[in-house]
Image (tube, rainbow, N blue to C red):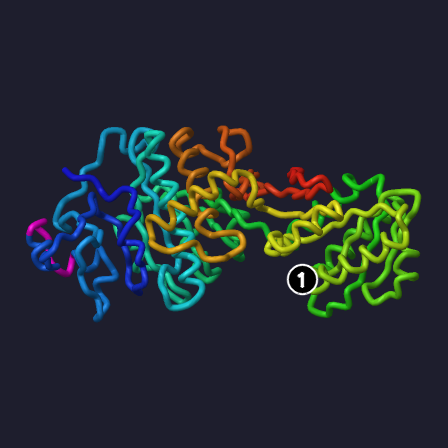
Amino acid sequence: MTRLFRYLLASSLLIFACGTIVAQSVKTHKVKKGETIYGIAHANGISESQLRSANPGMERSDYVLKKGDKIIIPSPQSAEVEEPMGADDVRQRPIRMGVMLPLHDINGDGRRMVEYYRGLLMACDSLKHEGISVDVYAWNTPEGADLLPTLQNANAGRCDIIFGPLYSKQMDQLSQFCNEHGTMLVIPFSITAPQLSTNSHLFQVYQSFDGQVPTLSRRFAEWFKDYHPVIVDCDDSNSTKGGFTSALRKELDSRSMNYSLTSLKSANSMFASAFSTQKSNVVVLNSSRTTDMDVIFVKLKDLQASNANIKVSLFGYTEWLAQADVQQANFHKYDTYIPAPYFPGFSPYLAKRLAQKYHSNFHQDMSPFTPPLAITGFDHAFYFLRGLHKYGKTFDGAAGRFNYLPVQTPLKFERMGNGGYQNRAFMFVHYKPGGQIDTVNY
């Protein structure tokens, strides 16, 4: 009996339709001159509607079948699924990966998640070279959708791991479903998930900045214990970083560490008075706005032009990484540390190869998101699928389970009480004055 689809990397990823997409094909077909949808379906023992459902782009009214197109040939729906030997042990059979995310072209959420999904599939394709087989099931779950019809699909209950959801309102249904079926649920992006405290099947990847504030304040005080901190007010009424600088001041006070307060609007002489001439200084803004970043670079340039004996390092925010290509020279000049859950420079060669592979598979470049979501998906899938293959359902995502250099997203999970697991991998990305870039884990 034919297996379910593996390594879907072509036409099915034109997922710009609003229905359920269940990957259940064993092969792709390259369209020859003169072939028709009806003829291809008839030759493969399936209906025209089955062929169209497996290739959502075909459902558009303006779709035209062209020579050279790669399309998915689904297995006949009447066929029974034959379970392989060792079906109860994920280490002895193909891993069944489900994806429940908005996979459409209606808005930015859908387009971003399609790119993330493509990264998941590129990881599946890479893992086959390690002998790891993956059966993929994907469902479009847009905002406001009731997940019940999706969860009632027989293939949903067969999944060993599911990536999703994107929306908090879908968490209750999906968390309960995974708890009942013993399915690992990877929550890849920012989401409210109170279920994490009680459901041991949940793995939350994203870490909010606010959730990192206590650890970040402590690590700042430890790392810069020999520095003189200078906290700069940016007069940003919408800033989300004031909570951090407030917590940082309390942490410094508790350690009896001296620090200074100043403002971006201060005259140069007043600004300079906040800096130590005896110690290296570390500058912290209470805003992550790129306009404030530009201003601080000008202020620091003027400061050192008139006070050559003042040594300065700069402490930034994850949002600054989006400006790394433009500001890299300044980052290096001012010995900049940026706290971040990802770093685009772990493996530049592999990142370039993935970008090339993405273009080859999907005939377009990755979108200019920061971080690139296809690479995020690749890291997530590679880590969890390899973990499942090695450890089975006992995989806990902890550090050191196997050697894996992430392309950009390190993963290190810790259990939250008796509940699920949360990614605790966070680091300082350090732009050194000499031009090197290091990462400091904490």
Label 1 is placed on what type of residue?
A: Thr
Please name whichever residue, 227 or 432, is drawn nearer the observer in this view of the structure: 432
Q: Quadrant of residue 54?
A: bottom left
Question: Residue placed farthest to the front in the image?
Answer: 305
Q: Is residue 399 above or below residue 342?
A: above
Please name whichever residue, 396 or 241, is drawn nearer the observer in this view of the structure: 241
Q: Position of residue 413 (x, y in %)?
A: 55, 39
Quadrant occupied by the C terminus = top right
Residue range (magenta): 43-50
Q: Residues within 10 Å of mark 1 (few under 14, many from 20)?
A: few
Q: Is residue 292 above or below residue 230?
A: below
Can residue 403 be seen in the rendering of this structure?
yes
Question: Dot 1: what SS?
Answer: helix
Q: Position of residue 268 (x, y in %)?
A: 88, 62
Residue 130 within the magenta-colored segment of the rendering = no
Q: Quadrant of residue 142?
A: bottom left
- 274 relative position to 397: left or right: right
Q: Position of residue 217 (x, y in %)?
A: 74, 47
Q: Position of residue 336 (x, y in %)?
A: 72, 47
Q: Which residue: 30% across, 33% down?
A: 88
Q: Quadrant of residue 96?
A: top left
Q: Which residue: 41% across, 61% down?
A: 111
- 245 relative position to 101: left or right: right
Please name whichever residue, 388 or 156, is drawn nearer the observer in this view of the structure: 388
Q: Which residue is mark 1?
A: 290
